[in-house]
Image (spheres, helix red, strand yellow):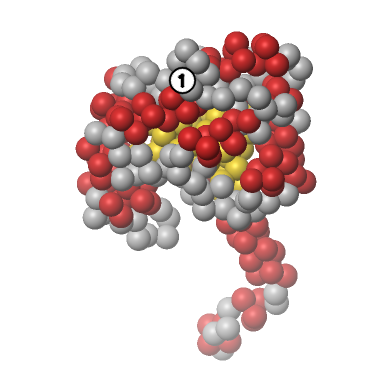
Amino acid sequence: MQNANRLRKALLSHSGISFGAWQMLPGGNLSRTIARTGYDWVCVDCEHGNIADNQMHESVAAIASCGVSPVVRIPANEAWMVKRALDSGAHGIVVPLLYTADNARNLVQSAKFPPVGQRGYGSPFSMGAFGRPSASEYLQQANEALVTIVQIETREAFENVESIARVEGIDVLLVGPYDLGNNLHHPITSGDGEPDVELKAAIEKIRKAAVAAGKKAGIYCISGEQARRYADQGFHMVRLLHSLTCLVHRLIGLRYLSLPIWSRYPHSWQILS
């Protein structure tokens, strides 16, 4: 199972860097299309995306069928949400809205089978996302094979980041820069998504806390240039592609290129005259 988890393999590789995409709209065909673009993982966003429970199951299976790790962002740190995501076959979960180390410990209890945690056993779907392990093999290997990712985006989580990072069973601390900036009163307002000096320092503090605890650090990016810079800075799990944003930008770009030059520049006659 661990070999089938492409995200985990990338995080444990020599470079330790993993690039992923983000799916906001439902559909197995969309999931497969994104998964075939060369990323290590695709996150099915059930927090802010328009993706219901049954659609999550379909997307997880579609992504895994392409040899890519399906990751699910659940809406909240609720045990039943953790169970539904992992029972679908997700290789990892992204959990928002943590505040304390106790929240992280409760998450581990939900995400791990006994004796480590209290996850219930019985899904007939989980194994299919890892090739052909038996139900017994999944039960025995899941605690080590799956990736548990917590978002650091609240003021409380930021203040408790060192203790959260030390919680056994947490694998990745993922920075949500927009909510983090809002909650620290340093919102990101520029179109290029660049944080101010104070927020940059806060982001680096989270990365250092993860590394100091022997964990991985992740971050949500909005451009290839930003993703490369954060990878060079030492982040390991880097979100690069947002399916809906890419679709909109591509459609706008194609429309722009199809217009006559005077339509692209309404006041170009002033320049040409």
Name the residue located 44 percent from the left edge and 25 percent from the top edge: 109
What percent of the width, then of the height, locates residue 252? 64, 66
Q: Residue at x 22, y 46 (%)?
A: 198
Give the number of callouts.
1
- Percent across and percent down for residue 104 are 36, 30
Vertical position of residue 142 compared to residue 19: above or below: above
Question: Can residue 256 be spotted in the picture?
Answer: yes
Residue under label 1: 117
Q: Is residue 87 left or right of residue 184?
A: right
> Quarter holding the N terminus?
top right
Residue 273, horizontal then vertical, whole percent: 56, 88
Query: Residue at left 72%, top 34%?
Result: 61
Q: Secondary structure at mark 1?
A: loop
Instruction: Please say if 70 is above or below 265.
Output: above
Which residue occupies the foreground of this view, 122 or 68? 122
Q: Residue at x 70, y 22 (%)?
A: 127
